[in-house]
Amino acid sequence: MPERFTVTTPIYYVNDVPHIGHAYNEVATDVLARWHRMRGDDTWMLTGTDEHGQKIMRTAAANGVSPQEWTDRLVESAWIPQLELLNIANDDYIRTTSERHKVGVRIFLERLKEAGYIYHGEFEGQYCVGCEEYKTANDLVPGTGEFEGQLVCAIHSRPIEVVREANYFFKLSEFGDRLLALYEERPDYVQPEHVRNEVRQFVKQGLNDLSISRNTFDWGIKVPWDETHVVYVWFEALLNYITANGYGVDDELFARRWPAVHIVGKDIARFHAVIWPAMQMAAGIEISSHVFGHGWLLVGGEKMSKSKATGIEPRQITEVFGVDAFRYYFMSAIAFGSDGSFSWEDLDARYHAELANGLGNLASRVIAMVHKYCDGVVPEVAVDADILALTTDAVGRAERAIDRFAIDEAVDAAMSIVERLNGYITEQAPWVLAKDEAQRDRLAAVLASNVHGIGAAAILLAPVMPETAQKLWAAVGGEGDVLAQRIQAAHEWQGTGRVTTVPPLFPRIEQAQPAS
Ligand code: MSP
């Protein structure tokens, strides 16, 4: 039986076009999904868009169109094209304005109400429309500039709004002990450790019930038993993870796809690791397998965001460096789980050092030498023992890293093959061996070892750089699709025994940062 691997991205707000923070999230999830597919797991990657709520309603109004028109426009012109641009192989895409989502949300709410977890009550709260979240005093900081003298949201630097309404509530406060027990019993449920600690601290302080409806605007899903209310956008958005998989409608599908692994930014880990599991407990569905909270991309030391004008669109980078280099850079340069600063200089330096001079150069040299010294035929001799040990070790390290969500370490393991082979070529100097008839066997072993190493690296790099990996794979005589190879056996691959050609993989770039 293959293992099940259902993995999700957050669903993105469509108030604006995507930036590289969103792309980071999507690429990381895609790499995990591709990796598991290559293991042979029953893999399902879900992504989508979060289309209700005040933020989107206001943005639509400011642009003079209805919220539905606005979301349709953004999804079609920006969010779906972004997946194509980044070569994301998602299996499904859920929109919260879709019928299947609305149906599932209503079923879930009815069940929660029947189970006694929803009540009607008075409410006053401080709301940040940017976050679509009620804030506590700890979440607010003194404003600066035009907001001097007011308290503002620490994330958006904008004033909060006071909401006074009669709403429906979810009895979140009843779940504190069960949540703490969950974190204890399953220490790898919330990762990495610092996010787990933060979440535990938050729950230990005591939970308040959660207001889950609004009745002062109507851009949302109506509460089934009271159509004067729409469901609070976060409560509804979290349900995308199950409404996409047949919850309440197709039990067989749901049983096959659920539970899921959620890859989210650390800023929304609390929603996923506190509110969401409490909702799951209340509704009697299995708790998600993991919530991994990755770090932020920082620009100039701050979380990169469109609202603070530090937003960079993925296209600005892919147009210069290509999609695979984009994916590689963000997956390798930042420890997954930590914040990482983006700079054009760092991207440019790593592109040239690791990809152009490291990987690209290795492949073109080796392929050229097999043509030159062996007429393109890979010598049928044993691979040097230390090179076989190198690839075997790299596969093991990469596999273990992926199970810890340490994507950067998995990439590092793959690239350790490239780095070592470059050193090995310099040491073995095949061009010297080629001049000496007595060294024919040695030359054969060195070339076979290099071809073997590049093939193994191509398989391990395929989830991160699918297009480049396919070119490398074909060049070393791999058959068919590199993505169809078993990643856990990358060190055992066998090819046709003939190399082909390798196109230029990473051309040199003169001007990294596009003139703005
Ligand atoms: N709609 C909610 C999620 C609902 S999931 C049930 C949301 N959307 S978002 O568009 O604001 O953010 C989506 C994801 O992008 C979040 O995981 C967030 O952490 C991530 N990022 C936004 N800016 C980012 C960076 N600068 N760096 C890394 N990730 C960033 O929240």
Image (cartoon, rainbow, N blue to C red):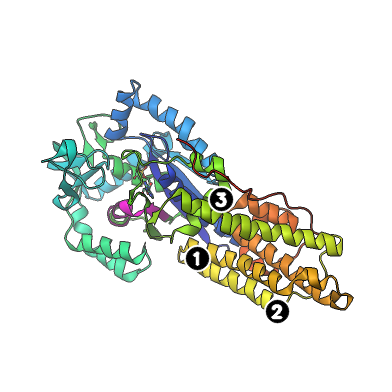
Between the C-alphas of marks 3 and 1, the distance is 17 Å
For the residues bearing labels 3 and 2, Cβ distance under 8 angstroms: no
Q: State the residue position of label 2.
A: 385
Asked whether residue 33 is in view, the answer is no
Relative to 454, 172 lies left or right = left
Q: State the residue position of label 1.
A: 409
In the rendered image, the vertical position of residue 420 relative to residue 270, given as above or below: below
* Magenta stretch: includes residue 257: no
Relative to 488, 160 lies left or right = left
Q: Quadrant of the N terminus?
A: bottom right
Percent of width and height locating residue 172 = 21, 53
* Magenta stretch: includes residue 266: yes
Of 3 and 317, nearer the camera is: 317
Between the C-alphas of marks 3 and 2, the distance is 31 Å
Q: Please state the extent of the stretch shown in magenta in the rendering.
A: 262-276
Task: Determine the secondary structure under disc 3.
Answer: helix
Q: Few, some or many C-alpha atoms within 10 Å of disc 3 (few <14, some 14-19, many ≥20)?
A: many
N-terminal of the pair, mark 3 or mark 1, is 3
